[in-house]
Every structure is written in structure tokens, then in C-alpha cells.
Amino acid sequence: MKILKYSIILIATGALFTACNKELNLDNPQAMGSDLALSTDANVKQVLIGAYDALSSGNLYGGNIQIFGDLMAASGELNWTGTFNTYREVYGNSILTTNPIILNMWASGYTTINIANNVIANLDKVNSADRDRVKGEALFIRGTVLFELTRFFAKSYNDGSPSTNLGVVIRTTPTTSFSEVDFPKRNTVSECYTQIVNDLTTAESLLPAKNGVYANKVAAAAILARAYLQMGNYTGARDAANRGLTAAAGNYSLVNPYSSEFNTSAYTTEDIFSIIVSEQDGTNNCHTFYSVPDYGGRDGDIVILDAHMNLYPAGDERKALFYLYSGDWRSGKWQYINKNVKVIRLAELYLIRAECNARLSQTTGATPLSDYNTVHTRAGLTAAISVTLADILFERRLELANEGFRVHDAKRLGETVNGRSAFDNKLVFPIPFRELNSNSNLEQNAGY
């Protein structure tokens, strides 16, 4: 997904600058009303680009989603050594309700959803030949962001009752003026996942198998597979992953060697969805905080500890990607500046299908052993002759390390992380204080 810095048209009411002599009244060009901003095919498509731009923010897929997923479940494998207390609170599972980076994730998420909703509400302006694709992309963005907000700000699907546990706020209509601002309650976790599945299922049906660097059918199937996996719906996850792999056939393949998949300035054959970063555009907070000054990073804020390094078997090329700096191990996935943020890789789909087939004792698409070996041998390891569910889950842990999956996997698998139960209240983000202060109908999460 290439993100270009188009001006994001404000879909909100604006003030008028009025000259003192009352002879010159000019509309503020930065406060364009929705009637003009969404009046043509070209304008709606530009607003869709704005939704992608918002999705690429450092508060979302520009890095913080991945970093938060890693730091929340560091478990002695990672260490936060940086000076930013905001990230240290995430690392220590001791987040204040006033933490600004948590607020920024919430606010950026709903800004992105609102832009997508504006596109969906104005599909009648889009050329009929492009309408399905535009709708599919907007639904992909909306469903994906709602999924991430639900994963971070609500209890996991397997923690108690999703039909009564509070999720986040579902928004399916745009807010275009201050008069439309309301004060909703939180929906339930179950309601959130129903909306996520509906958005992504429809997106998958509307999107093409190839769509340049924008969301396509494979990307929608991949996020849908993630959502089903988080729900413990292994048939749904397996089938979505299988559809994604089927649609990917002929267009995507794993990169060899493993190291060539990372630190790239363009899509590889393995990239299903990425945030494009260049000197002129884009944000990669994974590089900022995982990398070191010699490669344009901050101060090497996230250190990889021996407990993680010792997980890799001898000869595993994934271990060889780590590098030493000032006596500490660093993640080579985010080493170089102005490189892409990998959001969805093909390897993940093989591992989801393998896990779900193993759990279901089925072979839809391929055997668990075949999918496991596809990923395992690409890492330079000898093909296995048999495989267990534990093997597949361990392979997933190594393959997707430092890409933001750890806390979500720990929750769905019921694992203890950072000395806390997977269902510990502190493994759920607080609803930001500012949101509670402005909307009395919102309830705070337990433990805050």
C-alpha cells in the first residue's frame, strides 16, 4: 500500500474567516465541507487515499500497533531501555489513563474509520466501474482498524463472555459536522467482531486479487483469518487463510533467503500489505524504536534478550537476521531507515492454515505438515517428517517475532506473559481519560 501525502480533506464543518470590513468573506480551504470534498468521483477517491494515509500513521500500522503487541508481552525476551515513559508504561503493563500514545491510537483509529465511512456514504459519486473496488477498500480499512481497536481496548474473545464484555464503539456512519457529534456507549466484544467479520467478508468479495499496492482480496482474507483465529473459530480462520492462499497463487511467493523479505523499499513477492516509507513520506516507528543510531534509529530502545535468541535452533536463518550493537541483540527486521512496514506477509497465511487444519484434523488446501515445511524450510531448516500443533505454534512464534503478534497470541492461547495471566486486566488498554471526560456514556475497563 503506497501512501502518498495527499492533503486529507477535512470532513467536518469549518469556520469562515471574515475580514473586518465585511467586504471579503473567504471559505477556509482547510475546512472544506463534505458537500464539496465528496462531490465527485475524483474527490471521493482522494478521500480514500486519505484513509490509507491515516492508517499509515505511526499511531497505527506505521509502527505502534506492532510495537505495543510486542512490548505488552515481552516476558523476558525483550527489554525497553528507552527514555520515553509512555512506551515504558506499555512494556510494564502499568498504563496511565492519561498516556498520550494510547490516546493517539484511539483517536487515530476513529479518525481513520470516519474517513472510510465518508467514502462508503458517498459511493454513488464513484464511477460504477470502480465502485466495488472503492467500497471494498474502505470496508477493509474500517474493519481492520475496528479489529485492532477491539484487540487492544477490550477483553479477548475467549476471556469471559464476549456477548456481555464491553468492546469499543462501532461507527458505520460518518460524522461530517459538529451537530452530528453524539455520545455513544461501547458495543460488546461480540458485536464488534460481528461488524469486523461483516466488513472484511464483504471487502474480500468486492476486492480484486491484485490491486497495486492497495488492499486486495488476499489482504482482506488475511485480516479476516486473523479475526477468526482470535475468536477461536478455526474453521473460519482456516477457510479464510485458504481463500487468501488460493487468490495469491501465481502472484505471491515466499522470498528466499529469509533476510531478503525485510528492509525493503518496494513490495516483495511475499508482501500482501505494507506501509511504504521513503525519505519524503511515511512513518516506520518499528525502525525508530527497534533500530540504533548508526542506522538512523533513535537509541536502540528495544533490546532483544538471550531468552528470545535461545529459542532458535541451530542453522535457523531467522536468528542470523539479528545483529549485535553495543553488546545487545537487535531485531534485523527493522534495521534500516526509510524501509517499509510489513503488515501482512504470505508466511502468516501458511501458518494459520497449518494451525487450524491441525486443530481440526483436516487437510483443507494442504496438510499441516506441508504448510509447516513451506515456512520451516525457507528458514534454512531441514524438512520435518511429522508435525504437532505445538510445533506449528512454535514456528509461528519464531517466524512472526517482532511483528506485533505476541500479546494477541498469548491471549488466545491462554499463556502467561510478563508474569500475568492472559486474562489479566492490565493486558487490556484503558479507555483514554480524555474520551471518558468528554463522553459520560463510556465505561472504563476493569483495573483502571
Image: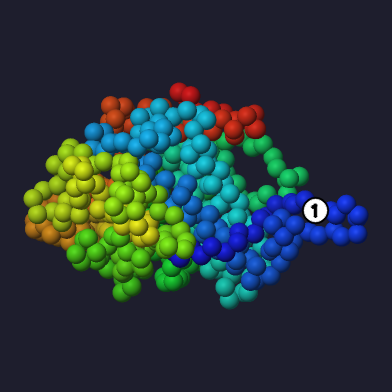
Relative to 448, is 175 above or below?
Answer: below
Could you say which is closer to the camera, residue 217 or residue 416? Answer: 416
Could you say which is closer to the camera, residue 127 or residue 331? Answer: 331
The residue depicted at 20 percent of the width and 58 percent of the height is 375
The residue depicted at 49 percent of the width and 33 percent of the height is 99
In the visual, does 89 lie left or right of 135? Answer: left
The residue depicted at 20 percent of the width and 50 percent of the height is 323
Give the x, y percent position of residue 222: 38, 57
Tell me where residue 251 sits by quadrant. Answer: bottom left
Return the residue found at the far bottom: 129
Relative to 408, is 121 above or below?
Answer: below
In the visual, does 11 lie left or right of 270? Answer: right
Relative to 199, is 426 above or below?
Answer: above
Mark 1 crowd level (few <14, some 14–19, many ≥20, 10 Å Cα): few
Give, as a three-letter code, the residue at label 1: Leu
Tell me where residue 115 sits by quadrant. Answer: bottom right
Give the x, y percent position of residue 180: 73, 45
Could you say which is closer to the camera, residue 307 or residue 129? Answer: 307
Relative to 1, is 415 above or below?
Answer: above
Could you say which is closer to the camera, residue 96 or residue 441? Answer: 96
The residue depicted at 17 percent of the width and 61 percent of the height is 378
